[in-house]
Amino acid sequence: MQWPNSKHNSKPSRAVDAMAFPLDWFDYQRSAHFAGYVLGIAQSMSIKLRWGGDWDRDGEMKDHKFIDYPHFEIIDD
């Protein structure tokens, strides 16, 4: 979604962008590893997240036209 309707802009915020340090916006493999860690911790806490590298949450990263590896959002389904 575009500004101002993004989940980043709701109160409380429903989305965050986060990456492992040091930042390398083009290290996609590292981004995927970091996402796995974040998603695993969230799952262990019964929090449902959607990641910008796998929008439909099917485990396949190559089936999306728009990729946003730093993006994580809470889903309510």
Image (tube, rainbow, N blue to C red):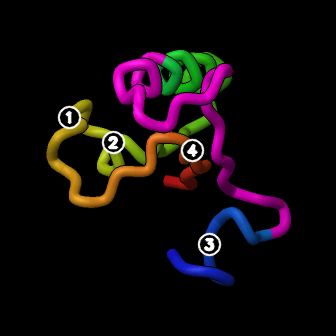
Q: Compared with residue 32, is residue 13 higher up or lower down, i.e. above or below?
A: below
Q: Main secondary structure of the magenta part?
A: loop
Which numbered marker is on residue 60? 1
Percent across and percent down for residue 72 are 57, 44
Q: Disc 2 residue type?
A: Asp
Percent across and percent down for residue 9 are 74, 70
Q: CA distance from mark 3 to mark 2?
A: 18 Å
**Dot 1 alpha-carbon crowd within 10 angstroms: few under 14, some 14 to 19, many 20 or more:** few
Percent across and percent down for residue 29 are 35, 21
Camera-side residue of 67 and 44:
67
Is residue 20 within the magenta segment?
yes
Secondary structure under tag 4 reads: strand
Q: Are marks 3 and 2 in contact (CB under 8 Å)?
A: no
Instruction: From the image, tell me which residue sits under label 2.
Output: 54
Which numbered marker is on residue 6? 3
Camera-side residue of 58 and 26:
26
Would you say 58 lies left or right of 25 here? left
Q: CA distance from mark 4 to mark 3?
A: 12 Å
Secondary structure under tag 2 reads: loop
Q: Are marks 2 and 1 in contact (CB under 8 Å)?
A: yes
Q: Disc 3 residue type?
A: Ser
Q: Disc 4 residue type?
A: Phe
Would you say 57 lies left or right of 62 here? right
Q: Compared with residue 74, is residue 49 higher up or lower down, i.e. above or below?
A: above
Report the residue at 30% width, 49% height from top: 56
- Lower sequence index among marks 4 and 3: 3
Name the residue at the left extreme: 63
